Image (cartoon, helix red, strand yellow):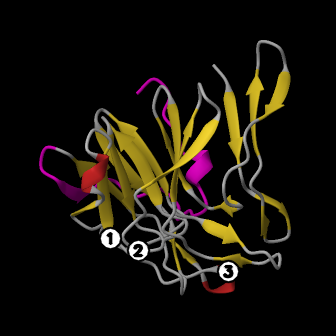
Amino acid sequence: GKLYQLGGYTSTWKPTNRADVYDPATNTWKRLADIPISITHAGVAADNQNIYLAGGYVGTPGGGQIFATRRVLRYNIPTNTWSNLPPLPQARGSGGFSNLKGELHFFGGANLNRIDRGEHWILKLNNIAAGWQPAAPLPNPRSHLGDAIVNGKIYAIGGQHSYDDYLTAQNTVHVWNPATKQWTRAANLPQPRSHIGSATFVING
């Protein structure tokens, strides 16, 4: 019943480590414990007690940013604390990230050189010590995509190739089925779209 705002840009290309929560019952915002790194373009997933951030663009002391990281962070809501989870096998930014029945899935995104990648890794929350395990890669490697879970399947929606003035938005939609452990194509978006992570969500199935 609350809204969480984690990181993001505060000015031109400058990520922040600030986190806040909004309570609609009191119409008030409350500042939370700072994120250990200044970050934007991170994957976000959650469960009843925790919020997870994976990959992203990380701010540098000089005020710039690097375009990928291996960091995976867990925010525990009851204790208002951050902790590290096993890092991604490779640095990524602007990838897809979902919590499917206690398994964290990170897929797609771009590497430190801003090259789009299709790797897909899974971290089981009931066996964190095992680390991230490889899974079938995302077809049509891309970044800045939307992702959602519907009826027990993960949807990877749209995204882009390349970046800034050179980007080409994508209309591709893929579906991860945990029963087959494979991605399959779904109907394309009516129009290519990217930067749609926070604009892609599920209501009533």
Q: Residue at x 59, y 80 (%)?
A: 167
For residue 151, side relative to residue 167 (left or right): left
116 or 67, which lies in front?
67
Please tell me whether mark 2 or mark 1 is closer to you in this view.
2
The N terminus lies in quadrant: top right
Residue 102, x across and y down, in percent = 32, 37
Kindly indicate whether the residue at mark 1 contacts the one at mark 2 (C-beta within 8 angstroms).
yes
For residue 127, side relative to residue 25 (left or right): left
Crowd rating for badge 2 (residues with CA inside 10 Å; few <14, some 14–19, many 20+): some
Crowd rating for badge 3 (residues with CA inside 10 Å; few <14, some 14–19, many 20+): few
Distance of label 2 from label 1 (alpha carbons): 9 Å
Residue 198, x across and y down, in percent = 61, 48
- Looking at the magenta stretch, what is its main secondary structure? loop
For residue 95, side relative to residue 42 (left or right): left
Q: Residue at x 77, y 78 (%)?
A: 64
Which residue is disc 3 drawn over? 164
Q: Which region of the structure is painted magenta?
A: 179-205
Residue 145, x across and y down, in percent = 50, 60
Three-letter amino acid code at the position of disc 1: Glu
